[in-house]
Each structure stands twice: as C-alpha cells, then as structure tokens.
Image: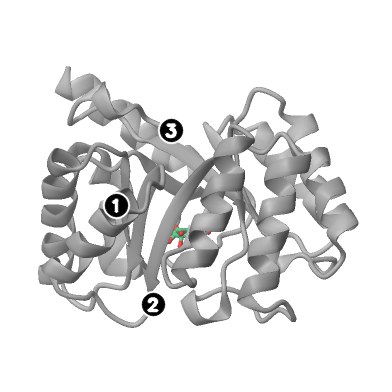
Amino acid sequence: MRQKNAGEGAPPAICVPLVGTTKEEIADELAEVLNKKPDMLEWRADFFRGIGDQQAVLAMVAFITGAAPDMPVIFTIRSEREGGQAIHLSDREAISLCAAVCVHTAIRYVDCELSNDPEQIQYLRDIAHQNGKKIIASFHQHQYTPAKEVLLEKLAEAQAMGLDIAKIAVMPCSMEDVITLLSVSLEANRQLRIPIVIIAMGKYGVITRIAGGIFGSALTFAVGSSSSAPGQIPIEDLQAMLHAIEKSMK
Ligand SMILES: O=C1C[C@@](O)(C(=O)O)C[C@@H](O)[C@@H]1O
C-alpha cells in the first residue's frame, strides 16, 4: 500500500483480485497473476465455493500467502448488498471468519464493510490489531455516486473507528460524479491521517483507476486474470500508464 507521506502524484499500489471458485481455479489464477508482478493481491473469498468451511478458507489463505510470501494480501468477503456474491454466511459469521483469518494466517489486510454492526467492526478491529493485521474499511455503492459530504463522512468514520485504511468504490452516472469523487479524494487525503482508496467503477470511472493516485488514492485495482468489478483495466496497461505518469510528474 502506498505510504501516507508519499505525496500527491506518487503512484498508487496496484492490487489484483483472485476470484476463482475452487482451489484449482485459484491456483491457476495465482500462477498467471504473479507473473504480471502486481504490488498486492486481494482474495475475494465470497467467490470461493468452500466459504462455509473455515478450515478450507484458512488453508486457501495459507496457500495464497505461501505462494507469494513477500506480497501483501487482502482477505475480502464482499457482501451481496455491497456487490459481492450471494453466500450462506450471515454478517456475524463472515466477521467471525475474518477474525479467524487474522488469528491463524499470514494475511496482512482484511476488508471490513462499514455497513456492518459497529460492535462487530470493533471486535474485528481489536482481533486484527492484536495479530498485527490491518483493516481496510470499505463502502460500496454500485448504483450511483452519493453526495460529496456523504463520502467524506464515510472516510472520516473509518478513521474515527480506529481502522487503518478507508476505501470507497462508487458508480458514477456522469463525468460530474467522477469530479465529485476526485475532489473527495483530494480533500480526504489532506484531512485524514490514514491512507484512503477511491474508486469510481464502470466506464466513466476508468480515469480514477489511472489518475486516482494523483488525487491521493493509495491503491488501484486491476485485472490480472479476471475482473472483480466493472471498469477494471488489465494490469499490463495500468502499469504502463502509471509508469508514464510517474515519469512525467517527477
Ligand atoms: O472494493 C474493491 C474495489 C473494487 O470494487 C473495484 O471497483 O475495483 C474491486 C473489489 O474486488 C474490491 O474489493
């Protein structure tokens, strides 16, 4: 993850999601994406068919972190209400699985949606911190872009709850929405102590995946093998564009 003091214009870290449904699919994906040298991986465990089996999930995390020991990995169970796959775990069960991943694996980051019960978020935060892991507090809106004040409030809420990184991913319906998001990014990055991640999805949002770092976003998601959200760019293209931007902004 890009450091908070890296300064505006520093390139964001590139994270690639793994969305396989079985161990075999994930192993194939992993081999393919590691060749492309991302900075981070995200395991979207809501795609995994074994999500209901804690031992299978812990074994899968160990497999992924073992295959790339130096690469930070994010463990994510995206809820259906925030655009994830339909799974049979309740929010409480999903949080308890995230807690087990914090205790028993070498994961570095766990994604936790701000729409969870605040007590559950605090419970996961404490377990994560006791085990040296960081929480990415997330907020997703797949239909539209909420008002600037709402988005700034979400990011500030993550910091106020003692979480480590604040992330928002929204769907712009116009280029004005994209400008709203970029201005949220600039303002929040200057106001907050914690790193922020800002993503606009879909076709209008593509520019935020390329230029978000200039406006303060610490991380951008790209396609290594398969995409996990609309508008993600192939990692090879994104690496080349970020390299060009960094060179020209020096
Ligand atoms: O929150 C995010 C961002 C994302 O939704 C995107 O738009 O790139 C992709 C998800 O996998 C990740 O958890």
At horizontal 18% and vertical 23% (from top left) the residue drawn is 248
Answer whether labels 3 and 2 touch (C-beta < 8 Å).
Answer: no
User: Horizontal and vertical percent for residue 224?
Assistant: 59, 46
Residue that label 1 marks: 160
Type of amino acid under label 1? Ala
The answer to whether residue 165 of the structure is visible from this angle is yes
Residue 203 as seen in the image, left or right of residue 97? left
User: Horizontal and vertical percent for residue 160?
Assistant: 29, 52
At horizontal 64% and vertical 72% (from top left) the residue drawn is 92
Measure the alpha-carbon separation of dots 1 and 3.
Answer: 20 Å
Choose between 51 and 85: the one closer to the eye: 51
In the rendered image, which quarter is residue 62 located in? top right
Q: Is residue 170 above or below residue 213?
A: below
- Determine whether the residue tagged by mark 2 lies in a helix, strand or loop: loop
Type of amino acid under label 2? His
At horizontal 61% and vertical 75% (from top left) the residue drawn is 91
Residue that label 2 marks: 142
Measure the alpha-carbon separation of dots 3 and 2.
Answer: 24 Å
Measure the alpha-carbon separation of dots 1 and 2.
Answer: 25 Å
Label 2 neighbourhood size at 10 Å, few (<14), some (14-19), many (20+)? some
Q: How is the image coloured?
A: one colour
- Determine whether the residue tagged by mark 3 lies in a helix, strand or loop: loop
Whichever of labels 1 and 3 marks the residue nearer the N terminus, that label is: 3
User: Horizontal and vertical percent for residue 194?
Assistant: 30, 39
Dividing the image into 4 quarters, which one contains the N terminus?
A: top left
The answer to whether residue 175 of the structure is visible from this angle is no
At horizontal 12% and vertical 67% (from top left) the residue drawn is 149
Residue that label 3 marks: 1
Dividing the image into 4 quarters, which one contains the C terminus?
A: top left
Type of amino acid under label 3? Met
Q: Which mark is residue 203?
A: none
Whichever of labels 3 and 2 marks the residue nearer the N terminus, that label is: 3
